[in-house]
Image (cartoon, rainbow, N blue to C red):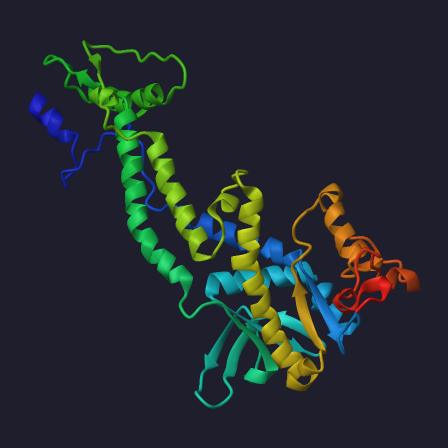
Amino acid sequence: MGLKDIFLSWFGKDGTLKLDAYVGKLATEVYFKELAIQACINLIANTISRSEFKTYEKGKETKKDNYYLFNVEPNPNKSASKFWRDVIHHLVYDNECLVVQQGDYFYVADSFNVDKYAFKDYIYTNIVIDDYQLNKTYFEPDVFHFELHNEKIRIIINGLYESYAKLIAAAQKHYKKQNARRGKLIVPTDYPQTDEAQKELQKLLNERFKRFFEAEGDAIVPLTNGLEYEELENKANGNKGSMEGRDIRAFIDDIFDFVAIAFQVPPQLLKGNVADTDKAVNNFLTFCINPLAELLTDEINRKMYGKKNYLERTYMKLDTSNIRAVDIKDVAGALDILLRIGAYSVDDCLKYLGMEPLETEWSKARWMTKNYEPIETRFEGGDNGEK
């Protein structure tokens, strides 16, 4: 067997190199998109779970069965926090969520079929809850069907990500190629052609050189029979136009930015940046959480309470005012103003601070400082009685 035959023996029948040359493998799939979507879902779900479903009867806030059902225990298997996390997950990820009532409890459907009609109630069938399929057919008034958008945002994100995934993969490949070590193994013409020598050469290439390249510290590979290894200089490292690790991170940041924009989440909140946090939280509540809260309560009020009760001020409201963590020193001045103009009672202030109200006659009363008076009194001349 000559040198040419030895060289050709390194290749398979399909022309591929059989040697285990040490080249970093590029994963065929990356999960940055899914990470960004799940981060959005968790952020929105965590925020909604901190909200409170308030129930009213004839305009007066009450805490009865419905309050307990929506804020503590929607069903025996899940707390309200877990229940609403499931609702938000389906709503954001699947663009819709179906909640059905069984007995006195509510359950989130994992999957379902819906037949839509222009002038008749929608019909829901094949409803599956925790791997159990219901045989019952539900009509539109019997369920809560929450829908987020007209189009599935996740489909749009998937289409956008297909292009960016290629850019990220190319950046990773280019980065690894630039920083990979390269060398050449010089095989002398008089290298032994015996089977034993060939096996030793194969072992050298497949095992010893692999450990040599993978070594984190200093490493040495022994060479015999006139073999020589020569390290090749990576000229790409000195190229100003070369790809760096930061360029890959920039592509990933773009993915998070696009996903955040799709769900009206400030990108800095999604990525944990602390700059302008107060402004970002305000935008998050205004453009993402409050519209979502209105979407949930509108569906609950029209299906559970109905027109007559709602117009008589018997309804449910998702209160998002206590989502933000506040320092009592930061709100003391505002509470003082609200108290002295009669907007808040003492009990209202205590509730805002997360404390139990006193439920006394004086703590429920409205107070107003003497500095305020009706404008009619001023027009009539005030205390002097002058017109």
The picture places residue 68, in percent across and down from the top left corner, at 76, 68
The outermost residue toward the front is 386
The picture places residue 299, in percent across and down from the top left corner, at 59, 75
Residue at 45 percent across and 83 percent down: it is 115
The picture places residue 203, in percent across and down from the top left corner, at 28, 23
Residue at 72 percent across and 47 percent down: it is 331
Which quadrant would residue 350 be assigned to in this image? Answer: bottom right
Quadrant where the N terminus sits is top left
Quadrant where the C terminus sits is bottom right
Question: Where 141 sits versus 346, above or below?
Answer: below
Q: Nearer the viewer, residue 302 or 326?
A: 326
In the figure, is residue 100 to the left or right of 39? right
The outermost residue toward the right is 361
Which quadrant would residue 59 be assigned to in this image? Answer: bottom right
Residue 371 visible in the picture:
yes
In the figure, is residue 323 to the left or right of 186? right
